[in-house]
Image (tube, rainbow, N blue to C red):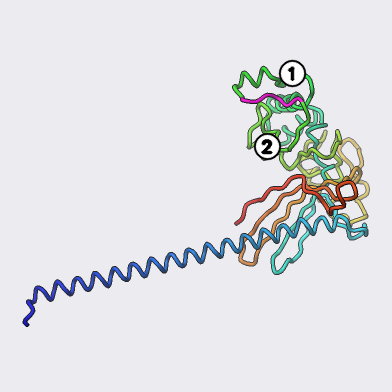
Amino acid sequence: MIRHPRQTGVAFIIVLWVIALIAIILGSFAVIARTEGLQARHLFDATTARYAAEAGIHRAAFELRNPDIMTRWVADGRPYEFDFDGTKVEVKITDDSGKIDINVADNILLKALFVSAGIEDARAEELADAIVDWRDPDELASPKGAEDSEYKSADLKYLPRNAPFETVSEIQQVLGMDYDIYHQIENSITLYSGRSQPSPGYAPIEVLRALPGMTEEYAQMIVTQRQAAQPGSPPTGLMLPDGTPVVAEGGGLTYSIESRATLPNGASARLDATIRLGGTGIGGKPFVVLRWRDGENS
């Protein structure tokens, strides 16, 4: 049988198309396989880093219970690093007595905190008064604060609690507060110190900036000298602008811990937790978690 040249040419083109289609399919499978491999690797790295960061929380709780004051970790925000199965873990601990307790602090200190965060005076005063009005039991508004009528006028679906804050994030519901401001002050505030004034021996720089007469440079100097002191040997002669000695007094059992784990390939995870060290009062547990937040993975 004799084939027509035109038929032969058509068959050749069909063969080429089939080969091209097979190549496309194989290429697609290769891309899918590679993508799934990368996704699996990312998930593995993220999980590994996450649990290494959790190990940092447990290590911090262990070191805070160290009976040897000379080797016990100091909860003034200084970084501690250790290796966990090839992963670098950095832990920073802050005693919550160094933070501003939003259930106890007066509006003067609260306003100073907002001003130190870059909020203009008028709005800082409104926020401070609104915080006091949120937590106090009466319905009498502070001079620049907010009670039921102001929340209704703002078309909000809720009213002030007229009771103490139950979580730190609840402060976002206060009239005039937004997430950007909350994000700036989040690491400076607590519910667990019970102190009207923060302890400067543990206060983060954001809190030190809110103290009377404080400048950015002087606050940084206090943090640097405080963290350079050896455990069990607090710095001597270090004072606040008003002459108050900077001593590590008022330390409690509640701590805020930031733990970041970084793998050799750069993947990382961060955990932020507030814990209270255990004892007979809470069932003998090493610690209980009061607040927990998973940070970003990268």
- x 61%, y 60%: residue: 46
Nearest the eye: 252 or 40? 40
- Where disc 2 sits, the SS reads helix
**Residue identifier under label 2:** 182
Mark 2 belongs to which amino acid?
Answer: Tyr
Residue 159 magenta: yes
Q: Which mark is residue 202?
A: none
Furthest residue to the bottom? 1
Residue 51 vs 134, above or below: the answer is below
Residue 36 magenta: no
The stretch in magenta equals 157-162
Structural crowding at the residue carrying mark 1, measured as other residues with C-alpha within 10 Å and reported as few (<14), some (14–19) or many (≥20): some
Q: Position of residue 271 (x, y in %)?
A: 70, 52
Image quarter of residue 216: top right
- x 76%, y 64%: residue: 82
Q: Position of residue 131 (x, y in %)?
A: 74, 28
Q: Position of residue 34 (x, y in %)?
A: 47, 67
